[in-house]
Amino acid sequence: MRWRRAVGACFLGPMVIREISPADKAEDLSAVLPVAQAVFNEQMPGFPLLSATRLRMRCFPDHHAVLRVFAAFADDEARTADAMALVEWEEDANPDLMGASVWVAPQARRRGLGAALYAEVLALSAAVGRPRVVVNGASTVPVDAVVAAYGGRRVEEMIRSVLDLAGVPRSRMTEAAAATDANAGYRLVRWTDHCPDELAGSFCAAMAVMADAPQGDLVYEHVAHDLEGLRERERLSVLAGVRRHVLAAVTPAGEIGGFTVFSSAAEGPLALDIWDTGVVRAHRGNGLGLRLKAAQTLWMLDEFPAARWVQTFNNADNAHMLAINRALGYRAAENWSSYEFGPTRPGGQVG
Protein backbone atom coordinates (compact mmCIF):
# COMPACT_ATOMS: atom_id res chain seq x y z
CA MET A 1 0.00 0.00 0.00
CA ARG A 2 1.48 3.36 -0.96
CA TRP A 3 0.58 6.75 0.51
CA ARG A 4 1.63 10.11 -0.91
CA ARG A 5 0.54 13.52 0.26
CA ALA A 6 -0.25 15.79 -2.69
CA VAL A 7 0.78 19.41 -2.19
CA GLY A 8 1.30 22.38 -4.45
CA ALA A 9 -0.21 25.63 -5.63
CA CYS A 10 -2.75 23.97 -7.95
CA PHE A 11 -4.39 21.98 -5.15
CA LEU A 12 -6.91 23.53 -2.77
CA GLY A 13 -5.83 22.11 0.58
CA PRO A 14 -4.08 18.84 1.50
CA MET A 15 -5.03 15.46 0.17
CA VAL A 16 -3.61 11.98 0.20
CA ILE A 17 -3.29 9.75 -2.85
CA ARG A 18 -3.15 6.08 -1.99
CA GLU A 19 -2.66 3.07 -4.24
CA ILE A 20 -5.33 0.51 -3.36
CA SER A 21 -6.53 -2.98 -4.36
CA PRO A 22 -10.35 -3.03 -4.71
CA ALA A 23 -10.25 -6.41 -6.43
CA ASP A 24 -8.62 -8.04 -3.39
CA LYS A 25 -9.54 -5.97 -0.34
CA ALA A 26 -13.13 -5.37 0.74
CA GLU A 27 -12.22 -2.17 2.59
CA ASP A 28 -10.62 -0.71 -0.55
CA LEU A 29 -13.65 -1.59 -2.63
CA SER A 30 -15.91 0.09 -0.07
CA ALA A 31 -13.68 3.16 -0.09
CA VAL A 32 -14.14 3.88 -3.80
CA LEU A 33 -17.62 2.48 -4.47
CA PRO A 34 -19.40 5.77 -3.59
CA VAL A 35 -17.19 7.69 -6.04
CA ALA A 36 -17.80 5.22 -8.85
CA GLN A 37 -21.52 5.10 -8.20
CA ALA A 38 -21.85 8.89 -8.14
CA VAL A 39 -19.91 9.31 -11.40
CA PHE A 40 -21.69 6.48 -13.21
CA ASN A 41 -25.05 7.84 -12.07
CA GLU A 42 -24.06 11.17 -13.61
CA GLN A 43 -22.73 9.59 -16.79
CA MET A 44 -25.68 7.23 -17.26
CA PRO A 45 -28.70 8.95 -15.71
CA GLY A 46 -31.68 6.72 -15.06
CA PHE A 47 -29.64 3.51 -15.28
CA PRO A 48 -29.41 1.16 -12.25
CA LEU A 49 -26.72 2.02 -9.73
CA LEU A 50 -23.29 0.45 -10.32
CA SER A 51 -22.93 -2.56 -8.03
CA ALA A 52 -19.89 -3.43 -5.94
CA THR A 53 -19.51 -6.62 -7.96
CA ARG A 54 -19.36 -4.74 -11.26
CA LEU A 55 -16.80 -2.29 -9.88
CA ARG A 56 -14.70 -5.13 -8.50
CA MET A 57 -14.73 -6.76 -11.94
CA ARG A 58 -13.40 -3.53 -13.46
CA CYS A 59 -10.54 -3.61 -10.98
CA PHE A 60 -9.28 -7.04 -12.10
CA PRO A 61 -6.50 -6.84 -14.72
CA ASP A 62 -7.15 -8.50 -18.04
CA HIS A 63 -5.06 -11.49 -19.11
CA HIS A 64 -1.41 -10.45 -19.58
CA ALA A 65 -2.19 -6.94 -18.35
CA VAL A 66 -1.29 -4.74 -15.40
CA LEU A 67 -3.99 -2.76 -13.57
CA ARG A 68 -3.39 -0.26 -10.78
CA VAL A 69 -5.91 1.78 -8.83
CA PHE A 70 -5.28 5.10 -7.09
CA ALA A 71 -7.65 6.93 -4.77
CA ALA A 72 -7.60 10.49 -3.43
CA PHE A 73 -8.60 11.02 0.21
CA ALA A 74 -9.17 14.21 2.17
CA ASP A 75 -6.55 13.23 4.77
CA ASP A 76 -4.77 10.28 6.38
CA GLU A 77 -7.79 9.36 8.47
CA ALA A 78 -10.39 9.33 5.69
CA ARG A 79 -11.62 5.91 4.65
CA THR A 80 -13.98 6.99 1.86
CA ALA A 81 -12.31 8.38 -1.25
CA ASP A 82 -13.30 11.57 -3.04
CA ALA A 83 -11.81 10.50 -6.40
CA MET A 84 -10.17 7.50 -8.02
CA ALA A 85 -8.19 6.48 -11.08
CA LEU A 86 -7.89 3.10 -12.81
CA VAL A 87 -4.82 2.57 -14.96
CA GLU A 88 -4.21 -0.48 -17.16
CA TRP A 89 -1.76 -1.56 -19.81
CA GLU A 90 -1.09 -4.75 -21.74
CA GLU A 91 2.18 -6.58 -21.33
CA ASP A 92 2.23 -8.29 -24.73
CA ALA A 93 0.79 -5.62 -27.07
CA ASN A 94 0.50 -1.88 -27.65
CA PRO A 95 3.80 -1.10 -25.90
CA ASP A 96 3.28 2.68 -26.05
CA LEU A 97 -0.33 2.70 -24.80
CA MET A 98 -1.93 3.04 -21.37
CA GLY A 99 -5.65 3.20 -20.65
CA ALA A 100 -6.98 5.23 -17.74
CA SER A 101 -10.23 6.29 -16.10
CA VAL A 102 -10.29 9.23 -13.69
CA TRP A 103 -13.46 9.75 -11.63
CA VAL A 104 -14.10 12.62 -9.22
CA ALA A 105 -17.22 12.63 -7.06
CA PRO A 106 -19.44 15.59 -8.10
CA GLN A 107 -19.44 17.12 -4.61
CA ALA A 108 -15.61 16.99 -4.47
CA ARG A 109 -14.84 18.83 -7.70
CA ARG A 110 -12.90 22.08 -8.07
CA ARG A 111 -10.49 20.99 -5.34
CA GLY A 112 -7.71 19.79 -7.62
CA LEU A 113 -8.43 16.09 -7.16
CA GLY A 114 -8.72 15.40 -10.87
CA ALA A 115 -5.49 17.28 -11.58
CA ALA A 116 -3.67 15.34 -8.87
CA LEU A 117 -4.83 11.99 -10.23
CA TYR A 118 -4.08 12.94 -13.84
CA ALA A 119 -0.60 13.93 -12.72
CA GLU A 120 -0.27 10.53 -11.03
CA VAL A 121 -1.38 8.78 -14.22
CA LEU A 122 1.02 10.77 -16.41
CA ALA A 123 3.92 10.19 -14.03
CA LEU A 124 3.20 6.48 -14.16
CA SER A 125 2.99 6.55 -17.98
CA ALA A 126 6.44 8.13 -18.10
CA ALA A 127 7.84 5.67 -15.56
CA VAL A 128 6.71 2.62 -17.53
CA GLY A 129 7.50 4.15 -20.94
CA ARG A 130 3.96 4.38 -22.32
CA PRO A 131 3.53 7.92 -23.67
CA ARG A 132 0.00 7.50 -25.07
CA VAL A 133 -2.69 7.68 -22.40
CA VAL A 134 -6.30 7.12 -23.49
CA VAL A 135 -9.26 7.98 -21.26
CA ASN A 136 -12.98 7.99 -21.99
CA GLY A 137 -16.00 9.82 -20.71
CA ALA A 138 -19.69 10.34 -21.39
CA SER A 139 -21.20 13.36 -23.10
CA THR A 140 -23.28 13.94 -19.96
CA VAL A 141 -20.14 14.99 -18.05
CA PRO A 142 -18.22 18.05 -19.35
CA VAL A 143 -14.58 17.21 -20.03
CA ASP A 144 -13.53 20.27 -22.06
CA ALA A 145 -11.38 21.64 -19.22
CA VAL A 146 -9.48 18.38 -18.82
CA VAL A 147 -8.95 17.95 -22.56
CA ALA A 148 -7.72 21.52 -22.97
CA ALA A 149 -5.47 21.45 -19.92
CA TYR A 150 -3.74 18.25 -20.98
CA GLY A 151 -3.69 18.73 -24.75
CA GLY A 152 -5.93 15.77 -25.44
CA ARG A 153 -7.60 14.90 -28.73
CA ARG A 154 -10.69 12.83 -29.44
CA VAL A 155 -9.75 9.54 -31.09
CA GLU A 156 -12.99 7.57 -30.90
CA GLU A 157 -16.69 8.14 -30.36
CA MET A 158 -19.00 5.46 -28.98
CA ILE A 159 -22.75 5.25 -28.55
CA ARG A 160 -24.28 3.57 -25.52
CA SER A 161 -27.59 1.95 -26.44
CA VAL A 162 -30.10 0.62 -23.94
CA LEU A 163 -33.01 -1.80 -24.20
CA ASP A 164 -35.95 -1.73 -21.80
CA LEU A 165 -36.77 -5.39 -21.35
CA ALA A 166 -40.15 -4.53 -19.85
CA GLY A 167 -41.24 -3.15 -23.21
CA VAL A 168 -39.90 -5.92 -25.45
CA PRO A 169 -42.62 -7.47 -27.65
CA ARG A 170 -41.77 -11.15 -27.29
CA SER A 171 -43.52 -12.12 -30.53
CA ARG A 172 -41.36 -9.75 -32.56
CA MET A 173 -38.20 -10.96 -30.82
CA THR A 174 -39.17 -14.60 -31.45
CA GLU A 175 -39.70 -13.84 -35.11
CA ALA A 176 -36.30 -12.13 -35.38
CA ALA A 177 -34.61 -15.08 -33.64
CA ALA A 178 -36.09 -17.65 -36.00
CA ALA A 179 -33.83 -19.29 -38.57
CA THR A 180 -34.10 -18.01 -42.15
CA ASP A 181 -33.26 -19.76 -45.39
CA ALA A 182 -29.86 -18.04 -45.30
CA ASN A 183 -28.86 -19.14 -41.79
CA ALA A 184 -30.89 -22.30 -41.16
CA GLY A 185 -27.68 -24.34 -41.35
CA TYR A 186 -26.41 -22.88 -38.09
CA ARG A 187 -27.46 -24.21 -34.71
CA LEU A 188 -27.44 -21.87 -31.73
CA VAL A 189 -25.36 -23.08 -28.77
CA ARG A 190 -25.16 -21.28 -25.46
CA TRP A 191 -23.02 -21.62 -22.36
CA THR A 192 -22.33 -19.77 -19.12
CA ASP A 193 -18.92 -19.20 -17.52
CA HIS A 194 -17.04 -22.00 -19.31
CA CYS A 195 -16.82 -22.55 -23.05
CA PRO A 196 -17.20 -26.25 -23.97
CA ASP A 197 -13.83 -27.77 -24.77
CA GLU A 198 -14.97 -28.87 -28.23
CA LEU A 199 -15.81 -25.26 -29.17
CA ALA A 200 -12.98 -23.44 -27.39
CA GLY A 201 -10.55 -23.34 -30.30
CA SER A 202 -13.18 -22.15 -32.74
CA PHE A 203 -14.42 -19.55 -30.26
CA CYS A 204 -10.92 -18.14 -29.84
CA ALA A 205 -10.59 -17.88 -33.62
CA ALA A 206 -14.01 -16.26 -33.96
CA MET A 207 -13.21 -13.58 -31.37
CA ALA A 208 -10.56 -12.21 -33.72
CA VAL A 209 -13.48 -10.62 -35.58
CA MET A 210 -13.57 -7.86 -32.95
CA ALA A 211 -10.50 -6.39 -34.65
CA ASP A 212 -12.75 -5.61 -37.64
CA ALA A 213 -14.93 -3.23 -35.65
CA PRO A 214 -14.45 0.50 -36.38
CA GLN A 215 -12.31 2.29 -33.80
CA GLY A 216 -12.08 5.84 -35.17
CA ASP A 217 -8.57 7.33 -35.01
CA LEU A 218 -7.53 5.15 -32.11
CA VAL A 219 -4.38 3.18 -32.92
CA TYR A 220 -4.79 -0.13 -31.15
CA GLU A 221 -3.42 -3.61 -31.87
CA HIS A 222 -5.80 -6.47 -31.09
CA VAL A 223 -4.03 -9.50 -29.68
CA ALA A 224 -4.99 -12.93 -30.96
CA HIS A 225 -7.14 -14.90 -28.53
CA ASP A 226 -5.87 -18.25 -27.29
CA LEU A 227 -7.12 -20.96 -24.98
CA GLU A 228 -4.97 -19.82 -22.06
CA GLY A 229 -6.39 -16.30 -22.29
CA LEU A 230 -9.96 -17.56 -22.64
CA ARG A 231 -9.73 -19.75 -19.55
CA GLU A 232 -8.08 -16.99 -17.53
CA ARG A 233 -10.79 -14.47 -18.41
CA GLU A 234 -13.45 -17.01 -17.52
CA ARG A 235 -11.73 -17.64 -14.18
CA LEU A 236 -11.47 -13.94 -13.35
CA SER A 237 -15.14 -13.34 -14.13
CA VAL A 238 -16.22 -16.12 -11.79
CA LEU A 239 -13.81 -14.87 -9.13
CA ALA A 240 -15.28 -11.37 -9.37
CA GLY A 241 -18.85 -12.66 -9.17
CA VAL A 242 -19.73 -11.69 -12.74
CA ARG A 243 -21.10 -14.42 -15.00
CA ARG A 244 -20.51 -14.37 -18.75
CA HIS A 245 -23.16 -15.83 -21.03
CA VAL A 246 -22.27 -16.73 -24.61
CA LEU A 247 -24.57 -17.55 -27.52
CA ALA A 248 -22.85 -18.88 -30.64
CA ALA A 249 -23.96 -19.83 -34.14
CA VAL A 250 -22.28 -23.13 -35.00
CA THR A 251 -21.98 -24.80 -38.42
CA PRO A 252 -22.54 -28.54 -38.96
CA ALA A 253 -18.74 -28.87 -39.00
CA GLY A 254 -18.50 -27.41 -35.50
CA GLU A 255 -17.15 -24.00 -36.55
CA ILE A 256 -18.42 -20.87 -34.82
CA GLY A 257 -19.64 -18.37 -37.39
CA GLY A 258 -20.87 -15.71 -34.97
CA PHE A 259 -21.38 -15.04 -31.28
CA THR A 260 -22.69 -12.58 -28.74
CA VAL A 261 -21.66 -12.27 -25.09
CA PHE A 262 -23.49 -10.68 -22.18
CA SER A 263 -22.77 -10.58 -18.46
CA SER A 264 -24.83 -10.67 -15.28
CA ALA A 265 -24.15 -10.16 -11.59
CA ALA A 266 -26.19 -11.53 -8.72
CA GLU A 267 -25.76 -8.18 -7.01
CA GLY A 268 -27.59 -5.53 -9.01
CA PRO A 269 -29.61 -7.91 -11.26
CA LEU A 270 -31.67 -5.14 -12.84
CA ALA A 271 -29.06 -4.46 -15.54
CA LEU A 272 -27.30 -6.75 -18.02
CA ASP A 273 -24.27 -5.81 -20.12
CA ILE A 274 -23.53 -6.94 -23.66
CA TRP A 275 -19.78 -7.21 -24.03
CA ASP A 276 -19.06 -8.43 -27.58
CA THR A 277 -21.01 -9.39 -30.67
CA GLY A 278 -19.39 -10.46 -33.92
CA VAL A 279 -19.86 -12.44 -37.11
CA VAL A 280 -16.83 -14.03 -38.79
CA ARG A 281 -16.17 -12.58 -42.26
CA ALA A 282 -16.85 -15.83 -44.10
CA HIS A 283 -20.27 -16.07 -42.45
CA ARG A 284 -21.51 -12.52 -42.98
CA GLY A 285 -24.50 -11.60 -45.11
CA ASN A 286 -26.68 -14.38 -43.67
CA GLY A 287 -28.52 -12.40 -41.00
CA LEU A 288 -26.64 -14.05 -38.14
CA GLY A 289 -26.12 -10.81 -36.22
CA LEU A 290 -29.85 -10.07 -35.95
CA ARG A 291 -30.73 -13.69 -35.19
CA LEU A 292 -28.10 -13.95 -32.45
CA LYS A 293 -29.01 -10.68 -30.75
CA ALA A 294 -32.74 -11.53 -30.83
CA ALA A 295 -32.13 -15.02 -29.42
CA GLN A 296 -29.88 -13.49 -26.78
CA THR A 297 -32.74 -11.20 -25.72
CA LEU A 298 -35.09 -14.18 -25.36
CA TRP A 299 -32.47 -15.88 -23.20
CA MET A 300 -32.33 -12.79 -20.99
CA LEU A 301 -36.11 -12.66 -20.66
CA ASP A 302 -36.31 -16.34 -19.71
CA GLU A 303 -33.36 -16.60 -17.33
CA PHE A 304 -33.38 -13.11 -15.80
CA PRO A 305 -37.02 -12.13 -15.29
CA ALA A 306 -36.01 -9.48 -12.74
CA ALA A 307 -33.73 -7.72 -15.23
CA ARG A 308 -35.05 -4.44 -16.59
CA TRP A 309 -32.28 -2.94 -18.67
CA VAL A 310 -29.64 -4.08 -21.17
CA GLN A 311 -26.81 -1.84 -22.32
CA THR A 312 -24.25 -2.11 -25.11
CA PHE A 313 -21.55 0.15 -26.51
CA ASN A 314 -20.76 0.52 -30.23
CA ASN A 315 -18.46 2.73 -32.24
CA ALA A 316 -20.44 5.58 -33.81
CA ASP A 317 -19.27 4.40 -37.26
CA ASN A 318 -20.49 0.83 -36.75
CA ALA A 319 -23.64 1.41 -38.79
CA HIS A 320 -24.44 -2.29 -39.24
CA MET A 321 -24.51 -3.18 -35.54
CA LEU A 322 -26.29 0.03 -34.64
CA ALA A 323 -28.98 -0.80 -37.20
CA ILE A 324 -29.43 -4.25 -35.65
CA ASN A 325 -29.77 -2.70 -32.21
CA ARG A 326 -32.36 -0.20 -33.41
CA ALA A 327 -34.33 -2.95 -35.16
CA LEU A 328 -34.51 -4.81 -31.85
CA GLY A 329 -35.67 -1.79 -29.88
CA TYR A 330 -32.46 -0.40 -28.44
CA ARG A 331 -32.40 3.39 -28.13
CA ALA A 332 -29.36 5.65 -28.07
CA ALA A 333 -28.66 6.88 -24.53
CA GLU A 334 -25.58 9.10 -24.76
CA ASN A 335 -22.28 9.37 -26.61
CA TRP A 336 -18.93 8.43 -25.10
CA SER A 337 -15.62 9.76 -26.36
CA SER A 338 -12.09 8.45 -25.99
CA TYR A 339 -9.36 11.06 -25.69
CA GLU A 340 -5.67 10.50 -26.18
CA PHE A 341 -3.20 12.50 -24.08
CA GLY A 342 0.55 12.83 -24.34
CA PRO A 343 2.93 13.15 -21.36
CA THR A 344 2.22 16.86 -20.77
CA ARG A 345 1.56 18.64 -17.51
CA PRO A 346 -1.60 20.60 -16.83
CA GLY A 347 -1.51 24.34 -17.34
CA GLY A 348 -4.22 25.00 -14.76
CA GLN A 349 -6.47 23.47 -12.19
CA VAL A 350 -8.63 20.57 -13.32
CA GLY A 351 -11.11 18.55 -11.27
Image: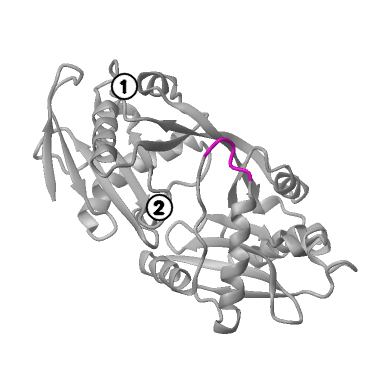
Camera-side residue of 98 and 68: 98
Left or right? Give the position of 299 relative to 15.
Answer: right
**Residue 237, percent across and down?**
42, 66
Left or right? Give the position of 311 relative to 2.
Answer: right
User: What kind of element bears circle 2?
Assistant: loop
- The kind of residue tagged 2 is Ser
- At a point 42% along the width and 37% down the height, the residue shown is 134
Camera-side residue of 108 and 211: 211
Above or below 327: residue 203: below
Left or right? Give the position of 309 relative to 6.
Answer: right
Camera-side residue of 231 and 302: 231
Mark closest to the chain's N terminus, 1 or 2: 2
Inspect the magenta stretch and tell me whether residue 348 lies in it.
no
Does any portion of residue 305 appear in the rendered image? no
Label 2 neighbour load within 10 Å: few <14, some 14-19, many 20+? some
Which colour scheme appears in the figure? one colour
- The kind of residue tagged 1 is Val
Q: Quadrant of residue 217?
A: top right
Q: Quadrant of residue 319?
A: top right
What residue is shown with label 2? 51
**Residue 287, percent across and down?**
81, 60
Does any portion of residue 50 appear in the rendered image? yes
Identify the magenta region: 214-218
Q: Please, what is the dominant secondary structure of the magenta stretch?
A: loop
Can you tell which of label 1 and label 2 is closer to the viewer? 1
In which quadrant of the rendered image does the C terminus lie? top left
What residue is shown with label 1? 350
- At a point 48% along the width and 74% down the height, the residue shown is 227
**Residue 212, percent across and down?**
64, 52
